[in-house]
Amino acid sequence: MSQQPDTEAVKAYLLGLQETICQRLEAVDGKAPFIRDSWQRPEGGGGISRVIADGAVFEKGGVNFSHVMGDTMPASATAHRPHLAGAPWQAMGVSLVIHPENPYVPTSHANVRFFIATPKDGAPVYWFGGGYDLTPYYGFDEDCIEWHRTARDACAPFGEEVYPRYKQWCDDYFYLKHRQEPRGVGGLFFDDYNTGDFDRDFAFMQSVGNSYVEAYEPIVRRRKDHPWSEREREFQLYRRGRYVEFNLVYDRGTLFGLQSGGRTESILMSLPPLVRWDYDRHPEPGSEEARLTEHFLTARNWLEDEHA
């Protein structure tokens, strides 16, 4: 059992993960490449933003790697860790959001991250976090089941209780309180992950990170050629508004990035290029638009019919 954090190993993995995801999604799109934008943070550290736009499938997407550091932990990271206030810190991770153009292809988000702080006269304190979630506009049961099955399988080597716990945490976290509705159909969310065995903790983060593209790519390939009309496009843009609201009001990563003096262009790459807000809009009863909230955006166990 290893308790000594290996920061360089984590960084090497994250850079490799960014490259793998970009390559896989470029192959699915078949038209637009991910451009590479390296940046430095004056306060310490930097990152690499990879952005795709106006593709055959992806209207906008970003896969961002960052490795930033500072002398004092941001308030968002010390709210429930007061003993780390004033400690020097490092944070690194890969964070991505993919917005397809076709309304039948869901938006997806993923993030895996590593934090380490060294309090005065103390040993380094580390934790992992991350997960992924799916936001359909026109849902399909098989997509949701496959998404959650892949998430469950990624967690399985680490205990039977892991997937149910982090699935529920995802449902609770990606919830718009002011709308009283989930952002999507969930997936996984975990934070403050430290069992005391660094190697095992790092392996769990890798299992989650590696499984994202395995979960998302088959869904994109199934739906990317589905015909759509202006009606579906308009509804997609309206529902994207919920995505913007969550990211700007609740998202921990956004808040941490802004509070830590991060690069705004990279932090806000998760926002869609087009969006609309309609006043007091309600879907027509019995429509596919109504089915989104009535059938898909509900608290449910997508794997209840399977023998886990």
Image (cartoon, rainbow, N blue to C red):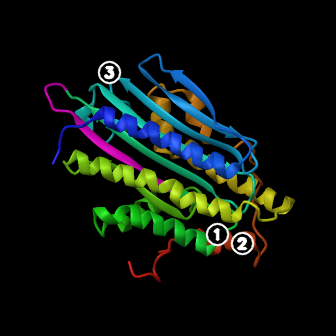
Residue depicted at x 22% and y 51%: 195
Contact, mark 3 vs mark 1 (Cβ under 8 Å):
no
Is residue 121 located in the magenta-colored stretch of the structure? yes
Contact, mark 2 vs mark 1 (Cβ under 8 Å):
yes
Would you say residue 241 is visible in this rendering?
A: no
Q: Which residues are magenta?
A: 120-132
Neighbor class of circle 2 (other Cα within 10 Å; few <14, some 14-19, many 20+) is some
Q: Residue furthest top?
A: 42
Residue depicted at x 48% and y 20%: 41
Give the position of the C terminus as an image quadrant: bottom left
Q: Position of residue 191 (x, y in %)?
A: 35, 49
Number of marks present in the image shown: 3
Residue depicted at x 75% and y 79%: 286
Three-letter code for the amino acid on which mark 3 is drawn: Asp
**In the displayed structure, does residue 66 sit left or right of residue 159?**
right
Q: Position of residue 11 (x, y in %)?
A: 38, 34
Mark 2 or 3, nearer chain start: 3
Q: Residue furthest left?
A: 121
- Cα–Cα span, label 2 and label 3: 50 Å
Residue depicted at x 67% and y 49%: 99
Label 3 SS: loop
Q: To which residue does mark 1 refer?
A: 293
Q: To which residue does mark 3 refer?
A: 71
Neighbor class of circle 3 (other Cα within 10 Å; few <14, some 14-19, many 20+) is some
Q: Quadrant of residue 178?
A: bottom right
